[in-house]
Amino acid sequence: MPNTGTLIVGAGHAGAQAAAALRQFGYEKPITLLTEETDPPYERPPLSKDYLARDKTFDAILLRPATFWASKNITLTLGQRAVAIDAAGHALHTADGTAIAYETLIWAAGGHARRLACTGHHLTGIHTIRTRADVDLMQAELAHTETVAVIGGGYIGLEAAAVLRKLGKSVVVIEMQDRVLARVAGPALSRFYEEEHRLHGVTLLLNTAVECIEERDGRAAGVRLANGTIIAADMIVVGVGIIPAVGPLREAGAAGANGIDVDEHCRTSLPDIYAIGDCAAHINPYAPAGQRIRLESVQNANDQAATAAKSIIAAATGAPAPHYDAVPWFWSNQYDLRLQTIGLSTGYDDTVLRGDPAARSFSLIYLRAGQVIALDCVNATRDYVQGKPLVVNRRIIDKALLADTAIPLKTHG
Amino acid sequence: MPILTVTNLAGATRDVTASAHGSVMEAIRGAGFDELAALCGGCLSCATCHVIVHPDDFARLAPMSADENDLLDGSDERTPTSRLSCQIPFTEALSGLRVTIAKDG
Ligand SMILES: Cc1cc2nc3c(=O)[nH]c(=O)nc-3n(C[C@H](O)[C@H](O)[C@H](O)COP(=O)(O)OP(=O)(O)OC[C@H]3O[C@@H](n4cnc5c(N)ncnc54)[C@H](O)[C@@H]3O)c2cc1C
Ligand code: FES
């Protein structure tokens, strides 16, 4: 095999960090970081926060200065889409017909925003928030937008709603479930955020299904609900999750049903191919035993990148490779509320409310079989920090003690 | 433009200049140091922008917020002059500031 080094597909949080980490840990072979996007690696979280609000410029959200990649001898290839993999031949094919040989491949292609499938889904004026280009398109229309319908009450939809209210738009959030954040948080957190959004003037429609998008003059003009009501809107923002970008890898034979399956070193079922970040379905020590999950977070992208980089270097030297076992954490900013999450609440069977949501500083603690598995902390950084050891050590603590704000969580550590 | 003196994990020290608009974190990241993760992009959610300020410079900084103090408490690497670099606005008045990137920075 020629000494072709490592090829990374996707230059988001995971791919960019994998390239940087390989160099940081002493990898000396060539590294190519290839992405279909035309911008150098940037942070995605601000897209629904400060960047959408124009509180940050694009330069301020670059993951590294544009000159960084060349200075580390990393070949950054922008605007190239991977379309096929020859796993046996160790080659990747791109949309323009180029074949790139690799010794090791890291698949870090994340996901693409899920779009609507109903009538009118293709109309101008419908937006998703996944890339810089998405947000620039939105911003170009915002000047002549007064009303916005946000479909999906997950973190991205709610963050966008908060920014759009701040920009003075009238905002309706349409959610199919009976509460916002239903997929990721407990009811007490959902109710709190629903109340906050209402107080900020957002109209929330829960238990509400979308029938189709209404058209006027070739543009989206509103959302028709399943009950026949039409929500007029100049702009429609769709925040209904992502579809993992794994086509070429799946076609090459990599195992995986939801994303691509990886082992504890982030290796796929194909030789010399790793997968990391949003697209990697892994066994996480903080999820229910044996459950394979994909995590969509900067923490996961970053820590899996480090695991893959160390494993690649270890494979060359025969040293033992590290296991991916980092504690999951996450954040979300809406209005003046800072949410910090530690652990994974998946599969919780009980919760404890610590503090008073009305005081806008509280934590929701998740338990599974009595063990502390996660905390959602709203404007409660101390609980977030002190709750971490409880999650790491799977502590079993009396619920009344957990709820008592007079006792710092570290007392139970 | 103000000057910042940064020592990386390997112990190498380099002076960098940065515009007086952003934070010390942005100045360090913008200069291409790859050890500073700054994963949350400066919104006081992660503590991965941890730096240790030179003891003689510490008093030049405005006091930290309670949240910054709490986040730093989660670090095993905390020292008496630890700060989260995203919380320090980098101004002309701070020119000459000396910081060392912490192990968990
Ligand atoms: C609006 C928004 C807000 C968020 N907020 C938070 C937050 O507050 N906190 C948090 O922890 N996480 C947040 N996230 C999630 C976080 O950004 C993701 O988990 C992270 O970006 C995943 O990184 P990744 O590298 O796996 O994928 P991505 O960042 O999606 O990068 C993958 C890259 O690969 C490219 N690509 C895909 N297919 C191909 C192909 N075939 N060929 C070439 N290139 C390809 C894509 O275009 C993309 O550029 C947010 C995400 C979004 C969209
Ligand atoms: S960058 Fe996250 S706290 Fe500073």
Image: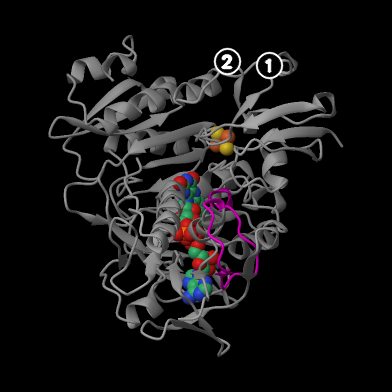
User: Are the residues at dot 1 and dot 2 in contact (C-beta closer than 8 Å)?
Assistant: yes
Type of the residue with mark 2:
Pro
Residue B80: mark: 2
Which quarter of the rendering shows the C terminus of chain A? Answer: top left
- Residue A260, quarter of the rendered image: bottom left
Q: Looking at this view, is A34 or A197 the one in front?
A: A34
Type of the residue with mark 1:
Pro
Range drawn in magenta: A24-47
- Residue A186, quarter of the rendered image: top left
- Residue A98, quarter of the rendered image: bottom right
Give the residue drawn at x 73%, y 18%. Answer: B57
* Mark 2 residue element: loop
Q: Looking at this view, is A176 or A263 the one in front?
A: A263
3D distance between C-alphas at marks 1 and 2: 8 Å
- The image shows residue A118 at horizontal and vertical percentages of 38, 74
Q: Is residue A225 above or below residue A178?
A: below
